């Protein structure tokens, strides 16, 4: 295939979600290693060029993303699609992202309030997924973040989430917080 690089680029562009190397390998019937090299070349080319978009590794795949500094201009285009979260939704998402797998009683213990409605909304928006049932009396459902969560927040994996040390650089009071014992929540 003389136009393999163009095909890789076209597949990534046309995909409605991040496209993994495994999926590209199946589509193009080529080894992952060869496609990884091509994708890395494309990432470097877009990074070096002065364009309004770049190729990013997001949620286990690759996707074209617009430059973050252009966001204020692009919001005009998608006024109806703005993604705003309530404080409760952000608290709940943060707890789940950092503590997964986690049950609803554990989340409610940490937040101090009922979180059923917020969790239903987050499930409806495909930001959470059910990971199974915890092996304790009552067998509560365990929750974790979804691939869509990674896409929305531009993360390759959960390892890209900021650490407590990074947060404490912003707010020194965070380092004084006492760790919570989740044993009581179960």
Image: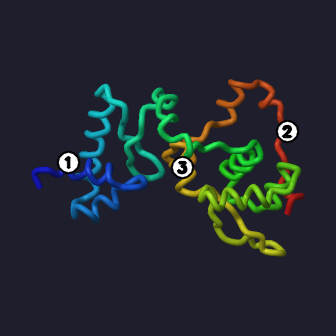
Q: Disc number at residue 178?
A: 2
Tag 1, which secondary structure? helix
Q: Is residue 52 above or below residue 21?
A: above
Taking the spot 20% from the left edge, 48% from the top edge, the residue there is 6
- Residue nearest the observer in this picture, 127 or 186: 127
Taking the spot 69% from the left edge, 46% from the top edge, the residue there is 94
Label 3: how many Cα within 10 Å (few below 14, some 14–19, many 20+): many
Taking the spot 87% from the left edge, 52% from the top edge, the residue there is 113
Q: Is residue 97 left or right of residue 137?
A: left
Q: Counting residues from the N terminus, which is met first, the one under dot 1 or under dot 2?
A: 1
Residue that carries the numbered disc 3 in the rendered image: 150
Q: Is residue 106 left or right of residue 60?
A: right
- Residue nearest the observer in this picture, 138 or 9: 9
Q: Position of residue 184 (x, y in %)?
A: 89, 58
Q: Is residue 111 left or right of residue 8?
A: right
Q: Counting residues from the N terminus, which is met first, the one under dot 3 or under dot 2?
A: 3
The span from disc 3 to disc 2 (Cα, nearest Å) is 28 Å
Residue that carries the numbered disc 1 in the rendered image: 6
Q: Position of residue 3 (x, y in %)?
A: 14, 50
Label 2: how many Cα within 10 Å (few below 14, some 14–19, many 20+): few
**In front: mark 1 or mark 2?**
1
Q: Disc number at residue 62?
A: none
Tag 2, which secondary structure? loop
Q: Is residue 33 above or below residue 132?
A: above
Task: Identify the image quadrant of the N terminus.
Answer: bottom left
| Quadrant in the rendering for residue 11 | bottom left
Taking the spot 86% from the left edge, 59% from the top edge, the residue there is 185
């Amino acid at each position: 295939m003389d136009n393999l690089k163009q095909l890789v680029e076209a597949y990534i562009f046309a995909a409605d979600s991040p496209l993994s190397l495994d999926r590209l390998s199946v589509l193009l019937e080529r080894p992952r290693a060869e496609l990884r090299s091509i994708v890395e070349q494309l990432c470097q080319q877009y990074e070096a060029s002065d364009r309004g978009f770049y190729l990013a590794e997001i949620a286990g795949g690759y996707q074209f993303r617009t430059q973050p500094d252009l966001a204020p201009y692009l919001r005009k285009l998608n006024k109806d699609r703005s993604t705003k979260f309530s404080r409760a939704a952000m608290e709940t998402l943060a707890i789940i992202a950092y503590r997964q797998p986690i049950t609803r009683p554990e989340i409610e213990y940490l937040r101090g309030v009922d979180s059923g409605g917020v969790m239903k909304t987050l499930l409806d928006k495909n930001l959470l997924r059910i990971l199974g049932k915890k092996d304790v009396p009552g067998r509560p459902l365990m929750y974790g973040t979804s691939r869509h969560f990674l896409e929305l927040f531009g993360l390759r994996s959960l390892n890209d989430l900021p650490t407590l040390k990074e947060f404490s650089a912003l707010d020194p009071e965070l380092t004084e917080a006492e760790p919570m014992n989740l044993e009581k929540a179960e």
